[in-house]
Image: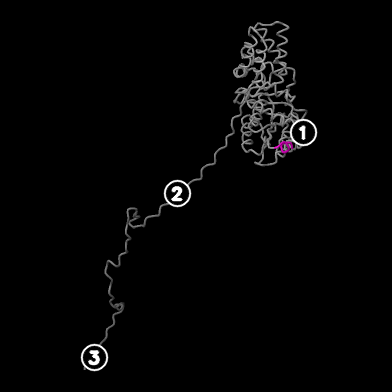
Amino acid sequence: MGTLYFVFRPGRKAVPPKTEQPPPDLLAPREPARGAGDQEEGGVATLPRPPVEEKEEPPAPPVETKPELELPPPSAGRMVRLRARLARSQNALGRGLLDLLSRDKLDDDTWDEVEETLITADVGVAPARAMVEELRTKVKVLGTRTPEELRGLLREELLKQVGGDMDRTLRTAPTGERPAVLMMVGVNGTGKTTTCGKLARSLIGDGRTVVLGAADTFRAAAADQLETWGARVGATVVRKEEGADPASVAFDAVATGLDLKVDTVIVDTAGRLHTKTGLMDELGKVKRVIEKKAPVDEVILVLDATTGQNGMRQARVFAEVVNITGIALTKLDGTAKGGIVINVQRELGVPVKLVGLGEGPDDLAPFDPEVFVDAIIGDGKSA
Protein backbone atom coordinates (compact mmCIF):
# COMPACT_ATOMS: atom_id res chain seq x y z
CA MET A 1 0.00 0.00 0.00
CA GLY A 2 1.40 3.37 -0.98
CA THR A 3 2.20 6.27 1.43
CA LEU A 4 0.63 9.81 1.01
CA TYR A 5 2.79 12.83 1.83
CA PHE A 6 1.40 16.35 2.54
CA VAL A 7 3.86 19.10 1.71
CA PHE A 8 3.35 22.54 3.38
CA ARG A 9 5.00 25.55 1.73
CA PRO A 10 5.74 28.28 4.23
CA GLY A 11 4.75 31.93 3.43
CA ARG A 12 1.72 31.14 1.25
CA LYS A 13 -1.74 32.07 2.33
CA ALA A 14 -4.81 30.21 1.63
CA VAL A 15 -6.60 31.49 -1.39
CA PRO A 16 -9.94 33.00 -0.38
CA PRO A 17 -12.97 31.66 -2.00
CA LYS A 18 -14.07 33.34 -5.19
CA THR A 19 -16.91 35.83 -4.94
CA GLU A 20 -18.87 37.22 -7.81
CA GLN A 21 -17.90 40.80 -8.68
CA PRO A 22 -20.58 43.31 -9.65
CA PRO A 23 -20.46 44.65 -13.17
CA PRO A 24 -17.86 47.40 -13.60
CA ASP A 25 -20.43 50.13 -14.25
CA LEU A 26 -21.97 49.53 -10.82
CA LEU A 27 -18.68 50.19 -9.07
CA ALA A 28 -18.18 53.63 -10.65
CA PRO A 29 -19.53 56.53 -8.62
CA ARG A 30 -22.84 57.76 -9.96
CA GLU A 31 -22.66 61.28 -11.38
CA PRO A 32 -25.60 63.50 -10.82
CA ALA A 33 -27.25 64.94 -13.84
CA ARG A 34 -25.65 68.26 -14.65
CA GLY A 35 -27.64 71.24 -15.66
CA ALA A 36 -26.60 74.43 -17.31
CA GLY A 37 -25.62 75.95 -14.00
CA ASP A 38 -23.43 73.01 -12.80
CA GLN A 39 -19.72 73.48 -12.56
CA GLU A 40 -16.87 71.08 -12.18
CA GLU A 41 -14.22 71.74 -9.61
CA GLY A 42 -11.02 69.72 -10.09
CA GLY A 43 -12.91 67.30 -12.33
CA VAL A 44 -15.56 66.61 -9.68
CA ALA A 45 -19.13 67.49 -10.57
CA THR A 46 -20.93 69.73 -8.09
CA LEU A 47 -24.57 70.60 -7.66
CA PRO A 48 -25.65 74.19 -8.50
CA ARG A 49 -25.54 76.58 -5.54
CA PRO A 50 -28.83 78.17 -4.62
CA PRO A 51 -28.95 81.86 -5.58
CA VAL A 52 -27.94 84.20 -2.75
CA GLU A 53 -30.73 86.61 -1.90
CA GLU A 54 -29.43 90.16 -1.80
CA LYS A 55 -30.74 92.05 1.20
CA GLU A 56 -31.96 95.51 0.37
CA GLU A 57 -30.17 98.18 2.29
CA PRO A 58 -32.58 100.35 4.28
CA PRO A 59 -32.80 103.83 2.79
CA ALA A 60 -30.60 106.36 4.50
CA PRO A 61 -32.55 108.71 6.73
CA PRO A 62 -33.10 112.10 5.09
CA VAL A 63 -30.64 114.69 6.21
CA GLU A 64 -32.53 117.47 7.88
CA THR A 65 -31.33 120.80 6.60
CA LYS A 66 -32.37 123.88 8.43
CA PRO A 67 -33.78 126.52 6.13
CA GLU A 68 -31.44 129.40 5.57
CA LEU A 69 -32.50 132.24 7.81
CA GLU A 70 -33.85 135.27 6.05
CA LEU A 71 -32.98 138.81 7.07
CA PRO A 72 -36.21 140.81 6.84
CA PRO A 73 -36.13 144.53 6.10
CA PRO A 74 -36.80 146.90 9.02
CA SER A 75 -40.36 148.07 9.62
CA ALA A 76 -39.48 151.75 9.30
CA GLY A 77 -40.78 153.21 6.05
CA ARG A 78 -42.79 150.12 5.06
CA MET A 79 -46.04 152.07 4.81
CA VAL A 80 -44.37 154.65 2.58
CA ARG A 81 -42.87 151.92 0.37
CA LEU A 82 -46.29 150.29 0.04
CA ARG A 83 -48.08 153.57 -0.62
CA ALA A 84 -48.36 153.04 -4.39
CA ARG A 85 -50.06 149.68 -3.84
CA LEU A 86 -52.43 151.23 -1.35
CA ALA A 87 -53.20 154.11 -3.72
CA ARG A 88 -54.12 151.75 -6.56
CA SER A 89 -56.87 150.19 -4.47
CA GLN A 90 -58.05 153.23 -2.54
CA ASN A 91 -57.77 156.35 -4.68
CA ALA A 92 -61.10 155.70 -6.39
CA LEU A 93 -62.65 157.11 -3.22
CA GLY A 94 -60.52 160.24 -3.38
CA ARG A 95 -61.13 160.78 -7.10
CA GLY A 96 -64.87 160.38 -6.64
CA LEU A 97 -64.98 162.90 -3.80
CA LEU A 98 -62.81 165.44 -5.64
CA ASP A 99 -64.92 165.12 -8.79
CA LEU A 100 -68.06 165.85 -6.79
CA LEU A 101 -66.53 168.77 -4.92
CA SER A 102 -65.21 170.28 -8.17
CA ARG A 103 -68.66 170.65 -9.76
CA ASP A 104 -69.76 174.10 -10.79
CA LYS A 105 -72.74 173.90 -8.48
CA LEU A 106 -72.52 172.35 -4.99
CA ASP A 107 -76.20 171.91 -4.19
CA ASP A 108 -77.97 169.58 -1.77
CA ASP A 109 -77.98 166.74 -4.29
CA THR A 110 -74.21 167.00 -4.73
CA TRP A 111 -73.61 166.90 -0.98
CA ASP A 112 -75.92 163.89 -0.73
CA GLU A 113 -73.75 162.17 -3.33
CA VAL A 114 -70.63 163.02 -1.32
CA GLU A 115 -72.21 161.44 1.76
CA GLU A 116 -73.29 158.37 -0.20
CA THR A 117 -69.76 157.94 -1.62
CA LEU A 118 -68.33 157.97 1.89
CA ILE A 119 -70.90 155.48 3.19
CA THR A 120 -70.26 153.04 0.33
CA ALA A 121 -66.54 153.25 1.19
CA ASP A 122 -67.36 151.75 4.63
CA VAL A 123 -66.77 155.03 6.44
CA GLY A 124 -70.04 154.55 8.31
CA VAL A 125 -73.17 156.69 8.38
CA ALA A 126 -72.33 158.88 11.38
CA PRO A 127 -68.73 159.69 10.32
CA ALA A 128 -69.89 160.34 6.74
CA ARG A 129 -72.50 162.86 7.88
CA ALA A 130 -69.99 164.57 10.16
CA MET A 131 -67.50 164.90 7.30
CA VAL A 132 -70.08 166.29 4.89
CA GLU A 133 -71.28 168.90 7.37
CA GLU A 134 -67.72 170.01 8.08
CA LEU A 135 -66.74 170.18 4.40
CA ARG A 136 -69.95 171.97 3.44
CA THR A 137 -69.36 174.64 6.07
CA LYS A 138 -65.72 175.19 5.10
CA VAL A 139 -66.45 175.42 1.38
CA LYS A 140 -69.26 177.89 2.01
CA VAL A 141 -67.34 180.07 4.46
CA LEU A 142 -63.95 180.01 2.77
CA GLY A 143 -65.28 179.99 -0.77
CA THR A 144 -62.53 177.59 -1.84
CA ARG A 145 -63.14 176.04 -5.23
CA THR A 146 -59.79 175.29 -6.89
CA PRO A 147 -58.77 171.61 -7.08
CA GLU A 148 -55.73 172.23 -4.87
CA GLU A 149 -57.83 173.98 -2.23
CA LEU A 150 -60.49 171.27 -2.29
CA ARG A 151 -57.85 168.54 -2.02
CA GLY A 152 -56.39 170.33 0.99
CA LEU A 153 -59.79 170.58 2.70
CA LEU A 154 -60.59 166.95 1.97
CA ARG A 155 -57.17 165.80 3.23
CA GLU A 156 -57.60 167.77 6.44
CA GLU A 157 -61.05 166.32 7.09
CA LEU A 158 -60.06 162.74 6.27
CA LEU A 159 -57.02 163.01 8.51
CA LYS A 160 -59.19 164.25 11.36
CA GLN A 161 -61.63 161.36 10.89
CA VAL A 162 -58.82 158.78 10.59
CA GLY A 163 -57.38 160.13 13.83
CA GLY A 164 -54.04 161.60 12.98
CA ASP A 165 -53.40 162.41 16.64
CA MET A 166 -54.11 158.91 18.04
CA ASP A 167 -51.30 157.04 19.77
CA ARG A 168 -50.47 154.14 17.46
CA THR A 169 -47.38 152.94 19.30
CA LEU A 170 -47.15 149.15 19.29
CA ARG A 171 -45.63 148.14 22.63
CA THR A 172 -43.15 145.46 21.61
CA ALA A 173 -40.08 146.52 23.59
CA PRO A 174 -39.11 144.59 26.74
CA THR A 175 -39.40 146.10 30.21
CA GLY A 176 -36.17 145.31 32.02
CA GLU A 177 -35.67 141.55 31.65
CA ARG A 178 -39.37 140.96 30.97
CA PRO A 179 -40.42 140.57 27.34
CA ALA A 180 -43.32 142.50 25.90
CA VAL A 181 -46.33 140.16 25.55
CA LEU A 182 -48.84 140.52 22.70
CA MET A 183 -52.06 138.54 22.28
CA MET A 184 -53.54 138.27 18.79
CA VAL A 185 -57.32 137.75 18.75
CA GLY A 186 -59.87 137.54 15.97
CA VAL A 187 -62.09 135.24 13.97
CA ASN A 188 -60.47 132.43 11.96
CA GLY A 189 -60.01 133.45 8.35
CA THR A 190 -59.06 137.06 9.01
CA GLY A 191 -55.34 136.35 8.64
CA LYS A 192 -54.61 136.24 12.36
CA THR A 193 -51.91 133.55 12.30
CA THR A 194 -50.29 135.09 9.23
CA THR A 195 -50.27 138.47 10.96
CA CYS A 196 -48.47 136.89 13.94
CA GLY A 197 -45.81 135.52 11.61
CA LYS A 198 -45.44 138.75 9.65
CA LEU A 199 -45.19 140.80 12.84
CA ALA A 200 -42.47 138.49 14.19
CA ARG A 201 -40.64 138.89 10.89
CA SER A 202 -40.94 142.68 11.06
CA LEU A 203 -39.66 142.80 14.64
CA ILE A 204 -36.69 140.56 13.81
CA GLY A 205 -35.95 142.90 10.91
CA ASP A 206 -35.73 145.66 13.54
CA GLY A 207 -33.19 143.61 15.51
CA ARG A 208 -35.59 142.16 18.10
CA THR A 209 -35.77 138.57 19.37
CA VAL A 210 -39.16 136.85 19.35
CA VAL A 211 -40.98 133.82 20.75
CA LEU A 212 -44.22 132.72 19.05
CA GLY A 213 -46.89 130.86 21.03
CA ALA A 214 -49.18 128.60 18.97
CA ALA A 215 -52.18 128.76 21.32
CA ASP A 216 -54.71 128.16 18.53
CA THR A 217 -54.70 124.44 19.33
CA PHE A 218 -58.04 123.74 17.65
CA ARG A 219 -56.46 124.12 14.20
CA ALA A 220 -53.40 121.95 13.62
CA ALA A 221 -52.62 124.00 10.53
CA ALA A 222 -52.26 127.13 12.67
CA ALA A 223 -49.33 125.70 14.65
CA ASP A 224 -47.69 124.35 11.49
CA GLN A 225 -48.11 127.70 9.80
CA LEU A 226 -46.62 129.55 12.75
CA GLU A 227 -43.68 127.13 12.89
CA THR A 228 -42.95 127.81 9.22
CA TRP A 229 -42.91 131.56 9.83
CA GLY A 230 -40.63 131.11 12.83
CA ALA A 231 -38.19 128.82 11.03
CA ARG A 232 -37.71 131.33 8.22
CA VAL A 233 -36.49 134.11 10.50
CA GLY A 234 -35.17 132.26 13.54
CA ALA A 235 -38.04 132.88 15.97
CA THR A 236 -38.63 130.23 18.65
CA VAL A 237 -42.08 128.59 18.40
CA VAL A 238 -43.82 127.01 21.40
CA ARG A 239 -46.56 124.51 20.48
CA LYS A 240 -48.32 121.43 21.81
CA GLU A 241 -50.46 118.66 20.39
CA GLU A 242 -53.74 119.47 18.68
CA GLY A 243 -56.53 120.03 21.18
CA ALA A 244 -54.20 120.98 24.05
CA ASP A 245 -55.25 123.65 26.52
CA PRO A 246 -54.60 127.03 24.80
CA ALA A 247 -53.86 128.71 28.13
CA SER A 248 -51.16 126.12 28.85
CA VAL A 249 -49.44 126.86 25.51
CA ALA A 250 -49.64 130.60 26.13
CA PHE A 251 -48.16 130.17 29.62
CA ASP A 252 -45.28 128.05 28.29
CA ALA A 253 -44.60 130.59 25.52
CA VAL A 254 -44.24 133.42 28.02
CA ALA A 255 -42.13 131.22 30.32
CA THR A 256 -39.87 130.39 27.38
CA GLY A 257 -39.61 134.07 26.52
CA LEU A 258 -38.52 134.84 30.08
CA ASP A 259 -35.98 131.99 30.10
CA LEU A 260 -34.48 133.02 26.75
CA LYS A 261 -34.64 136.73 27.67
CA VAL A 262 -36.23 137.63 24.34
CA ASP A 263 -37.71 141.04 23.56
CA THR A 264 -41.21 140.04 22.50
CA VAL A 265 -43.64 137.14 22.91
CA ILE A 266 -46.54 136.94 20.42
CA VAL A 267 -49.39 134.57 21.31
CA ASP A 268 -51.76 133.41 18.57
CA THR A 269 -55.20 132.50 19.96
CA ALA A 270 -58.14 130.49 18.66
CA GLY A 271 -60.73 132.38 16.66
CA ARG A 272 -63.84 130.30 17.13
CA LEU A 273 -66.74 132.72 17.35
CA HIS A 274 -69.36 130.27 18.66
CA THR A 275 -71.01 132.06 21.57
CA LYS A 276 -69.94 135.17 23.39
CA THR A 277 -69.86 133.24 26.67
CA GLY A 278 -67.57 130.53 25.31
CA LEU A 279 -65.31 133.09 23.71
CA MET A 280 -65.14 135.11 26.89
CA ASP A 281 -64.26 132.05 28.96
CA GLU A 282 -61.53 130.96 26.55
CA LEU A 283 -59.82 134.31 25.91
CA GLY A 284 -60.27 135.41 29.50
CA LYS A 285 -58.58 132.25 30.75
CA VAL A 286 -55.66 132.63 28.32
CA LYS A 287 -55.09 136.23 29.43
CA ARG A 288 -55.35 135.38 33.16
CA VAL A 289 -52.91 132.48 32.85
CA ILE A 290 -50.41 134.59 30.89
CA GLU A 291 -50.53 137.27 33.56
CA LYS A 292 -49.35 134.76 36.16
CA LYS A 293 -46.01 135.08 34.37
CA ALA A 294 -46.06 138.59 32.89
CA PRO A 295 -48.50 141.41 32.06
CA VAL A 296 -50.10 141.47 28.62
CA ASP A 297 -48.89 144.64 26.89
CA GLU A 298 -51.09 144.51 23.78
CA VAL A 299 -54.29 142.75 22.72
CA ILE A 300 -54.48 143.21 18.95
CA LEU A 301 -57.76 142.50 17.17
CA VAL A 302 -57.14 141.23 13.63
CA LEU A 303 -59.90 142.21 11.18
CA ASP A 304 -60.36 141.40 7.51
CA ALA A 305 -60.84 144.80 5.87
CA THR A 306 -62.87 143.27 3.04
CA THR A 307 -65.69 142.07 5.30
CA GLY A 308 -67.10 145.57 5.85
CA GLN A 309 -70.01 145.72 8.26
CA ASN A 310 -69.79 142.00 9.04
CA GLY A 311 -66.28 142.62 10.31
CA MET A 312 -67.63 145.41 12.48
CA ARG A 313 -70.09 143.03 14.15
CA GLN A 314 -67.26 140.62 14.92
CA ALA A 315 -65.16 143.48 16.27
CA ARG A 316 -67.88 144.52 18.71
CA VAL A 317 -68.13 141.00 20.15
CA PHE A 318 -64.38 140.78 20.76
CA ALA A 319 -64.32 144.30 22.22
CA GLU A 320 -66.94 143.23 24.77
CA VAL A 321 -64.98 140.10 25.65
CA VAL A 322 -61.42 141.38 26.03
CA ASN A 323 -59.75 144.75 26.47
CA ILE A 324 -58.48 145.47 22.94
CA THR A 325 -55.57 147.90 22.67
CA GLY A 326 -55.19 148.06 18.90
CA ILE A 327 -56.42 146.81 15.53
CA ALA A 328 -54.61 145.08 12.67
CA LEU A 329 -56.50 145.48 9.38
CA THR A 330 -55.60 142.80 6.84
CA LYS A 331 -56.27 142.64 3.09
CA LEU A 332 -56.50 146.41 2.79
CA ASP A 333 -54.98 146.23 -0.68
CA GLY A 334 -57.71 144.14 -2.29
CA THR A 335 -61.41 144.88 -2.52
CA ALA A 336 -61.36 146.59 0.87
CA LYS A 337 -62.75 150.07 1.17
CA GLY A 338 -60.48 152.33 3.13
CA GLY A 339 -63.29 153.94 5.06
CA ILE A 340 -63.37 150.96 7.42
CA VAL A 341 -60.32 152.45 9.15
CA ILE A 342 -62.47 155.40 10.21
CA ASN A 343 -65.48 153.29 11.12
CA VAL A 344 -63.73 150.64 13.19
CA GLN A 345 -61.80 153.20 15.22
CA ARG A 346 -64.95 155.20 15.89
CA GLU A 347 -66.89 152.08 16.93
CA LEU A 348 -64.21 150.55 19.18
CA GLY A 349 -62.37 153.62 20.37
CA VAL A 350 -58.97 152.05 19.71
CA PRO A 351 -56.48 152.89 16.94
CA VAL A 352 -55.55 150.89 13.88
CA LYS A 353 -51.89 150.05 14.55
CA LEU A 354 -51.07 147.61 11.74
CA VAL A 355 -52.25 147.15 8.17
CA GLY A 356 -51.72 144.26 5.78
CA LEU A 357 -51.25 145.49 2.23
CA GLY A 358 -50.59 142.28 0.32
CA GLU A 359 -49.72 138.59 0.35
CA GLY A 360 -45.97 139.04 0.60
CA PRO A 361 -44.09 138.31 3.85
CA ASP A 362 -43.11 141.97 4.27
CA ASP A 363 -46.50 143.50 3.44
CA LEU A 364 -47.47 144.19 7.06
CA ALA A 365 -46.78 147.79 8.03
CA PRO A 366 -47.30 150.12 10.98
CA PHE A 367 -50.30 152.28 10.12
CA ASP A 368 -49.40 155.84 9.12
CA PRO A 369 -52.52 158.07 8.87
CA GLU A 370 -50.88 160.70 6.65
CA VAL A 371 -49.55 158.16 4.14
CA PHE A 372 -52.97 156.48 4.14
CA VAL A 373 -54.91 159.70 3.47
CA ASP A 374 -52.45 160.86 0.80
CA ALA A 375 -52.85 157.51 -0.95
CA ILE A 376 -56.63 157.95 -0.95
CA ILE A 377 -56.79 161.47 -2.37
CA GLY A 378 -53.72 161.22 -4.59
CA ASP A 379 -51.50 164.15 -3.62
CA GLY A 380 -49.26 163.74 -6.61
CA LYS A 381 -46.25 162.60 -4.59
CA SER A 382 -44.27 159.63 -5.79
CA ALA A 383 -44.46 156.39 -3.80
Front in this rendered view, residue 20 or 317: 317
Magenta span includes 176? no
Tell me the element at label 3.
Answer: loop
Q: Nearer the viewer, mark 1 or mark 2?
A: 1
**Residue 180: percent from left, percent from top:** 74, 29
Residue tagged 1: 294
Measure the C-alpha gap from mark 3 to mark 1. 144 Å
Which residue is most to the bottom? 1
Magenta highlight range: 275-280
List x then y, in percent, for residue 271: 67, 34
Q: Nearer the viewer, residue 80 or 255?
A: 80
Residue identifier under label 3: 3
Residue 53, above or below 30 = above
Instruction: Assign the magenta stretch its main secondary structure.
Output: helix
Reading the image, the residue beneath label 2 is 54
* Image marks 3 and 1: residues in contact by CB distance under 8 Å: no
* Circle 1: element type: loop
Whichever of callouts 3 and 1 sits on the residue coming sooner in the sequence is 3
